[in-house]
Amino acid sequence: MVDVYEYPAKIDWLGERKYRIEFFSKGSEGKPKMDVATPPEFNGHAGIYSPEDLFVASILSCYMATFISISNKMKISIEKFTCEGKGILERTEGGLMFTSVVLRPHIILRDKSEVDKALKASTLAEENCLVAKSIKTKTHLEPKVE
């Protein structure tokens, strides 16, 4: 079993606080290049994803993938799953940083008797999401299960 994985990427400056990212990891063939920019609140551009957007999105997508994997192992019958997230960026003594990310998963179950199992899976997903474990920003989980 492989214990080390690599995710190479490259970014090119396009001028005027705009950048283009290209990905080179295994399976990235055919993935489009992604334009990113400094966000408007820092004199950047509207309508283009920012590193701040992608930071929160990476945590959300990792949490979802981890939750779905754990739910499958626990044989939880999910009808629908969505998760909203919000990154809190604050000025600290060390400068601007994300001080927290709030995750609000909304889980709808086919079998309403599995609420406790789904809440357990939600907590396990937060604890095991590799992106969240790899950052120093604290994540806060606020699940809603029906």
Image (cartoon, helix red, strand yellow):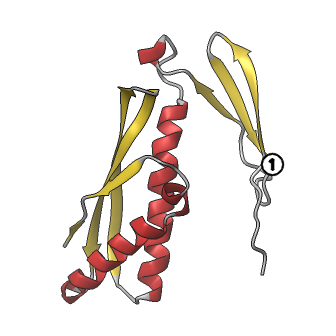
Count the labels in the image. Answer: 1
Q: Please name the residue shown 36% across and 44% down the image.
A: 100
* Front one among 134 and 125: 134
| Side (left or right) of 71 relative to 32 | left
Local SS, label 1: loop
Please, which residue is most extreme toward the front here?
A: 93
Which quarter of the figure has residue 126?
A: bottom left
Q: Quadrant of the C terminus?
A: bottom left
Q: Quadrant of the N terminus?
A: bottom right
| Side (left or right) of 111 relative to 89 | left
Which quarter of the figure has residue 141?
A: bottom left
Spot occupied by residue 114 in the image (x, y as percentages of width and height): 25, 86
Q: In the rendered image of this protein, does residue 30 appear above or below residue 67?
A: above
Q: In the rendered image of this protein, does residue 39 appear above or below residue 7?
A: above
Spot occupied by residue 116 in the image (x, y as percentages of width and height): 23, 83
| Side (left or right) of 45 relative to 78 | right
Label 1 sits on residue: 24
Q: Please name the residue shown 49% across and 23% down the image.
A: 47
Q: In the rendered image of this protein, does residue 83 appear above or below residue 38?
A: below
Amino acid at pointer 1? Phe
* Front one among 56 and 136: 136
| Side (left or right) of 119 relative to 74 | left
Structural crowding at the residue carrying mark 1, measured as other residues with C-alpha within 10 Å and reported as few (<14), some (14–19) or many (≥20): few
Q: Please name the residue shown 62% across and 15% down the image.
A: 17
Q: Please name the residue shown 41% across and 88% down the image.
A: 74
Spot occupied by residue 125 in the image (x, y as percentages of width and height): 42, 70
Spot occupied by residue 97 in the image (x, y as percentages of width and height): 44, 32
